Amino acid sequence: MSDQTFQYIALGIYFLGMIAIGLWASTKNTDNEDYMLGGRSLRPGVAALSAGASDMSGWLVMGLPGAIYVSGLLDAWIAIGLTIGAWVNWKVVAPRLRAYSEVSGNAITIPSFFDNRLKADGLSSRVLRVTCGLIILIFFIFYVSSGMVAGGKFYQTTFDGNYHVGMIVIAAITVLYTFFGGFLGATFTDVAQGLLMLVALVMVPVVAVIQFGGPGHVLNAVSEANPDALSLVSGATAIGVISSLAWGLGYFGQPHIVVRFMALRSPKDAPTGRRIGISWMVLSVVGTIATALTGIAYFSTHPEASLTDSKSAETVFLDLSQILFHPLAAGFVLAAVLAAIMSTVSSQLVVSSSAAVEDLAMLLIKRRPTPKVQLWMSRGAVLTVSVIAALIALDSDSAVLELVAFAWAGFGAAFGPLMLLSLFWRKLTASGGLCSMIVGAVVTIVWRYAIQDPESTGILALYEIVPGFAAALVVGVVVSLMTHRPSERVEREFAEAKELASAR
């Protein structure tokens, strides 16, 4: 059999496994709450691996290795910032959100939690829910699109195929198991995909180092190819390091990640989830960095070999796996790349669906549909978001990391300050929360497209999440102080959530 045949066999096994999990999960979905949140039944290990896999999208195996390959460890500051942010998110947000979302109206979506927590009513409630829903849909369309771009590049790189064909096929399979399986389908496929990603990210650099004769030989080759590649500070600017570390701020506002906290069995599961999730993340990030460095070493000492994508180097993980492994094993490594892409897309589609149905459509329908109708409305929303994202992804020149960076900043600035204030500050009001959310999103967009100058070494090069997050936090506090009125119900729920979250 040809090398490509072996790879197709491995990918076929992977695809069938994902579809089977999605179809199994569909048997567990009896209503929209099951489809959106899995009945709050996730064990900590499942929640941790699912959150990690849905977080670490194609950028982990394509975007980040490419950036480090081009710029050296300077871009590893992003990974450092993300690891710190993820730990704080599990430590601080997870137990309190799990408790508060149940105490305050048993919310099953992030917008419904904000609405219940802020005690918005009438028009203010509608405006809050619609604004949340629109922000989720707008930024997730870009996020889902980044996954489709990664899928198209994957097919183009691996099989020398047509970018658009690969994009459509991979997107279609992801949509299929998400369409039927919903939250549980996305979650359990995430677990399988997360484990596959971890194994691949460890194996590729390990095999490469062994072939080189040891870590010393690899590091020598990297130093000869690029003397600054192993430095975290060479060529760095204060603004650049701050921007990279600021990726960690984004965790507090990522709906597809924090919704896993809401789905835990109880707040007591959060510490175990944190230990499992951060261990997985550290190993995966170290594997990613090692892959980039071994890639520098290999391609600098093998002039006969070349990267498929020499401009962004986002194919270094794919190229190395095909060089180092038997075609069948390489096929499963390639499946790990797809796992990174598809796990994130499926999770984002579920949250987008919940925003479209629970936070937009339901506000326009006078008579609430039956649970079965709501279930099919959610599935229809999955298809709609997928089509719009696919249209954006038709541009094969889109950079995966750039699309992810914009969507990450948008969510982090719009929802991050609002999430922290909602959970830890009693005086946050509906007006303060709404203004915070709008300002965070608007500042992020304006900074990115009207102010930011990537060529600058000063403040204008700052990652858009920093001004967006800061502005949203300040506005949320100021407006809340201006509009705050004591509420016995808010005080009671706040105290109850705090006590439930801290119970051991």
Image (tube, rainbow, N blue to C red):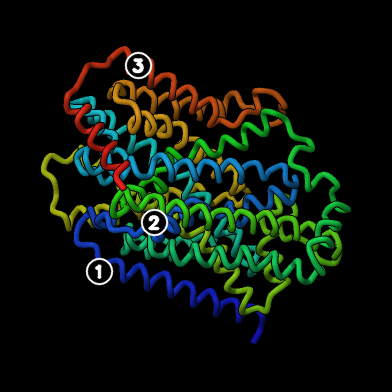
- Residue identifier under label 3: 479
Mark 3 vs mark 2, CA separation in Å: 35 Å
| Residue 308, above or below 443 | below
- Residue identifier under label 2: 47
Pick whichever of labels 1 and 3 is earlier in the sequence. 1
| Residue 296, above or below 329 | above
Pick whichever of labels 3 and 2 is earlier in the sequence. 2
Front tag of 2 and 1: 2
Tell which of 54 and 123 is nearer to you. 54
Pick whichever of labels 2 and 1 is earlier in the sequence. 1
Residue at horizontal 50%, vertical 29%?
A: 444
User: For residue 326, what is the image quadrant?
Assistant: bottom right
What is the residue that sits farthest to the left in this orientation? 367
- Place of residue 6 in the rendered image (x, y in percent of width and height, measured from the top left): 60, 81
- Residue identifier under label 1: 27
Q: What amino acid is found at the position of numbered circle 2 in the picture?
A: Ala
- Place of residue 60 in the rendered image (x, y in percent of width and height, measured from the top left): 59, 53
Residue at horizontal 28%, vertical 24%?
A: 430
